[in-house]
Amino acid sequence: MSTIATSIDNKPPVPRRNPWQWAKESLLASPLSILLTVLSVWLLVMAIPAVLDWALLSANFTAETAQECRATTGACWAFIREKHRLILFGLYPYDEQWRPLLVVFILTGTLIVSAIPRFWNRSLALIWIVSLTATGVLMWGGVLGLTYVENSRWGGLPLTLILATFGIAFAFPIGVLLALGRRSRMPAIKALCVVYIELIRGVPLISLLFMSSVMLPLFLPVGFSIDKLLRAQIAIIMFAAAYVAETVRGGLQAIPKGQIEGAESIGLSYWQQMRKIVLPQALKIVIPPLVSIFISLFKDTSLVVIIGIFDLTQAAKAALSDAAWRGFGVEVYVFISVIYFIYCYSMSKYSQSLERRLAVGQQR
């Protein structure tokens, strides 16, 4: 009996291929494949040495002035060393920049903890509440002996992470509720959700940002105003929630109707059906598109620059405005591109590992 159980639990054997077989099947399978492989190898041979020479071999890491950097043929990473605080933290007071640095670690740590299955319980909600509260206390200050810093001086990487993290944290549950509302049997709720989703998905994020910055204050009562950063955050949440809703709706439609009927037959309420049976399966199905939405949301936070918010890209532009260090735009944009890549690539790889882990029962 134990032998039979062991044989059932074992995964099917994976055929082994040597490097030549892999290359023949993947790179040399047809004349077109051979041509594309040759072109790709040629491009790599031409590009990699030039990039390495510019980025490392001929680069200047120790220059004290821009003139010293301009005398070299490679990259001027000394510019990043000189301006890294402005790029990373914007106009935040120099002596208080340990606070946004701590916020970066808190928000990044919260995202990492959220990816660990052992925390997928009620404690995760408490972790998010504590981390978001700590973020507000550290960035604003005014309590616990911290100097008050108005959010017009926030900028750089912490602000980008705040916009993205708060956007994900609030857009996801709102999107799930909108998806459920769109499939509701109550006509009024369904109509409202459909209008909201189609209206928001029908306009670009830039339009929402402009409306939140320019048009929204016109409709508010006299003497009442909403902070510009908060208006931008609301626009990002509204935009992402509409796309999350449509993605989750696709997952809900993929659930067989018989499972819902079975849940009804054993007396489960609507919310019990959704929480225990339908939503877990639907969300597992839509992991790849959901992660794509979150990656796009992280990158789209750079659009807030058009309404004067000092995000990572705007901080990079401010660093380039120094007359003494002009002409090193490539270096600064490579630097912030690496930051964006690290976060987006990490989310992408995590989604792939999560798919494999949740699909174990189907890989037989």
Image (spheres, rainbow, N blue to C red):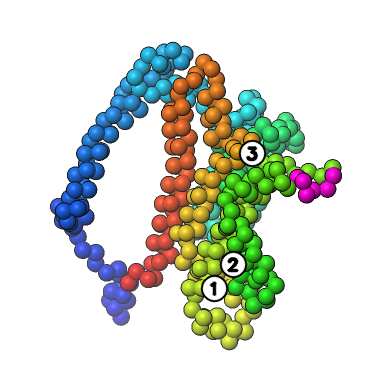
Residues drawn in magenta = 217-222
Q: Position of residue 363 (x, y in %)?
A: 34, 69
Residue identifier under label 2: 179
**Label 2 – label 3 distance at C-alpha:** 30 Å
Q: Nearer the viewer, residue 8 or 327?
A: 327
* Image quadrant occupied by the C terminus: bottom left
Mark nearest the camera among 2 and 3 is 3
Mark nearest the camera among 1 and 3 is 3
Residue identifier under label 3: 307
Q: Identify which residue is drawn at 59% across, 67% down.
A: 179
Residue identifier under label 1: 278
Q: Position of residue 83 (x, y in %)?
A: 52, 24
Q: Identify which residue is drawn at 44% across, 12% down.
A: 67
Q: Position of residue 230 (x, y in %)?
A: 69, 45
Question: Magenta segment: does it hold 185?
Answer: no
Count of residue discs: 3
Q: Identify which residue is drawn at 51% across, 54% down.
A: 293
Crowd tier of the residue under label 1, counting other residues whose Cα lies within 10 Å: few below 14, some 14–19, many 20 or above: many
Name which residue type carries label 3: Ile
Q: Identify which residue is drawn at 25% across, 38% down.
A: 44
